[in-house]
């Protein structure tokens, strides 16, 4: 195996935080430690090429014998997740891609609960055909436009105006989906060592984007019941972060929504700290039955003279993830900075996809109505199935979004993720949504799949839990799933 390039070192205390509660009983200590380290490597919480602490150093921090650490490291070397490098200790790596572990059914019957990605709207084929018939209208353009087509920006601006936030096309930049927007904002507005306030738990790829940009993450808690606004306000005023990333509508993964009075309280705090708020509205239109509506957070901010709100949106959750159209709404100064920074990453959004997005917006209210009806039906099926087959789990009924944040009653989330593929289900461990190894007692379970898939997925989860602890899983790069 080719030795990995050493990209950094993780200290024993940091590794201890990431490990969380790892010795759940039923396995020897070294097996449990190796399994937890393997999962951290697979899902990217420990990047490949990271030098792990020396055996004696880690043993002291974990309060375990050196023999336990040596045996765990040896197990990881045998599975291809750790290599010894002369003079550099042991470094993480991933084994060559291989067939996924065997399970009880065909490979194409694995239920993918790793991604909260609804199927495309049924009308998408006709929409794409109509857009393609108009391609002649854009073939005279160069195709290298870092802001977006005027027609689409005008249509997105109208969408905000319809929601109570007057917006001009000049305040919109079209992006390659929401993740592209997050990463572009991160590398433009964050300087190395800037503090970035994030919810905990939150969207994992946002955390990665802020860390890559050099941000130092500071967390504020959110649960299925909502935010601890006193903690959020106190953290803003104590830390004075350069940027705060919030998902106030149907938060991913908890499904919580921030009430209007709490939004005002947060805005009063950021006026004192000068923090730029980045609002992710990717799930804002997925209102299943909240019972109240509110204007976008930027409308409240601008009404109180605080324009430092950057709002992100996309069509990924509401229409189709394969339509890579997102956008950023911001003031002119921020958009100029984003425009200058964008050259380093891409040279604009494809013209054909922008034509498709225009067609989508012509039917958007109807498409949203269909999507929310579909998700409401699937949510109710998932909730009922979980309560029937896993009655000890704490199963919420969110009023929006596309997933449940389920309480497991025990720190088994990583074990479920690690062994799930042997039972036919692919799911992401709860700690993936945090920064410090927390959330072993939680699991995000999307309800974006069809009814039959959800039924099979729940039964596979129940089967996986009954089987714990299971034999060590020969993990592969096939398990390195993204999170959407």
Image: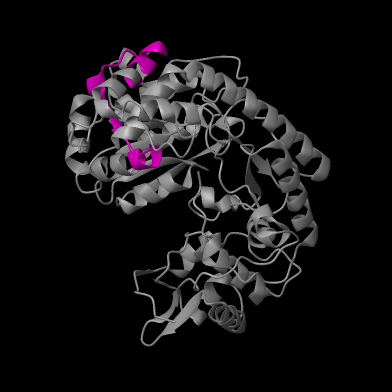
Find out whether residue 170 is within the magenta segment: yes
Q: Which of the 4 image quarters holds residue 242?
A: top left
Q: Which of the 4 image quarters holds residue 19?
A: bottom right
- Horizontal side of 436 relative to 170 (left or right) equals right
Q: Where is residue 10 in the image (x, y as percent from the top left)?
A: 42, 68
Residue nearer the viewer, 57 or 463: 463
Compared with residue 255, is residue 73 higher up or lower down, i.e. above or below?
below
The residue located at (17%, 36%) in the rendering is 142
Find out whether residue 403 is within the magenta segment: no
Q: Position of residue 195 (x, y in %)?
A: 33, 45
Number of callouts in the render?
0
Residue nearer the viewer, 400 or 481: 481
> Would residue 438 be seen by someone viewing this image from the given angle?
no
Compared with residue 475, is residue 378 higher up or lower down, i.e. above or below?
above
Q: Position of residue 270 (x, y in %)?
A: 34, 28
Q: Which of the 4 image quarters holds residue 32?
A: bottom right
Q: Where is residue 335 in the image (x, y as percent from the top left)?
A: 22, 31
Quarter of the N terminus within the rendering: bottom left
- Horizontal side of 378 relative to 462 (left or right) equals left
In the image, the segment drawn in magenta is 156-182
> Would residue 181 be seen by someone viewing this image from the given angle?
yes
Compared with residue 154, is residue 413 higher up or lower down, i.e. above or below?
below
The residue located at (21%, 48%) in the rendering is 344
* Residue with the most extreme bottom position: 86
Colour mapping used in the image: one colour
Residue nearer the viewer, 151 or 213: 151
């Amino acid at each position: 195996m080719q030795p990995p390039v050493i990209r950094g070192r993780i200290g024993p205390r940091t590794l201890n935080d990431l490990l969380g509660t790892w010795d759940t009983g039923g396995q020897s200590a070294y097996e449990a430690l190796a399994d937890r380290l393997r999962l951290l490597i697979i899902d990217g919480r420990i990047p490949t090429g990271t030098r792990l602490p020396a055996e004696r150093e880690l043993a002291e921090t974990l309060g375990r014998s050196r023999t336990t650490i040596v045996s765990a490291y040896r197990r990881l070397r045998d599975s291809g997740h750790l290599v010894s490098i002369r003079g550099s200790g042991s470094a993480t790596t991933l084994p060559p891609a291989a067939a996924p572990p065997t399970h009880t059914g065909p490979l194409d019957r694995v239920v993918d609960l790793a991604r909260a990605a609804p199927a495309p709207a049924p009308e998408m084929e006709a929409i794409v055909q109509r857009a393609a018939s108009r391609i002649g209208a854009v073939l005279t353009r160069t195709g290298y436009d870092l802001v977006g087509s005027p027609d689409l920006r005008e249509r997105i601006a109208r969408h905000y105006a319809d929601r109570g936030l007057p917006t001009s096309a000049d305040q919109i930049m079209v992006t390659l989906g929401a993740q592209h927007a997050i990463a572009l904002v991160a590398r433009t507005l964050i300087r190395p060592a800037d503090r970035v306030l994030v919810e905990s738990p939150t969207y994992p790829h946002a955390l990665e984007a802020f860390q890559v940009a050099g941000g130092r993450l500071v967390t504020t808690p959110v649960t299925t019941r909502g935010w601890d606004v006193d903690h959020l306000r106190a953290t803003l005023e104590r830390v004075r972060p350069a940027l705060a990333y919030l998902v106030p509508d149907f938060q991913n993964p908890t499904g919580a929504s921030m009430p209007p009075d709490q939004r005002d309280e947060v805005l009063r705090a950021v006026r004192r700290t000068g923090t730029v708020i980045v609002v992710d509205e990717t799930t804002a239109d997925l209102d299943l039955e909240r019972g109240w509506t509110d204007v976008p957070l930027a409308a409240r901010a601008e009404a109180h003279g605080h324009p430092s709100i950057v709002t992100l949106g996309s069509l990924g959750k509401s229409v189709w993830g394969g339509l890579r159209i997102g956008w950023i709404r911001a003031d002119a100064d921020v958009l100029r900075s984003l425009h200058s920074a964008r050259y380093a990453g891409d040279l604009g959004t494809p013209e054909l996809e922008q034509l498709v997005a225009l067609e989508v917006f012509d039917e958007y209210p109807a498409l949203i109505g269909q999507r929310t009806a579909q998700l409401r039906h699937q949510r109710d099926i998932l909730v009922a199935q979980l309560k029937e087959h896993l009655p000890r789990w704490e199963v919420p009924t969110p009023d929006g979004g596309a997933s449940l944040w389920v309480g497991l009653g025990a720190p088994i989330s990583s074990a479920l993720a690690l062994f799930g593929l042997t039972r036919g289900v692919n799911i992401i461990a709860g700690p993936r949504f945090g920064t410090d190894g927390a959330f072993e007692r939680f699991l995000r379970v999307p309800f974006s799949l069809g009814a039959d898939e959800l039924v099979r997925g729940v039964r596979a989860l129940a089967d996986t839990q009954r089987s714990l602890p299971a034999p060590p899983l020969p993990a592969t790069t096939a398990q390195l799933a993204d999170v959407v």
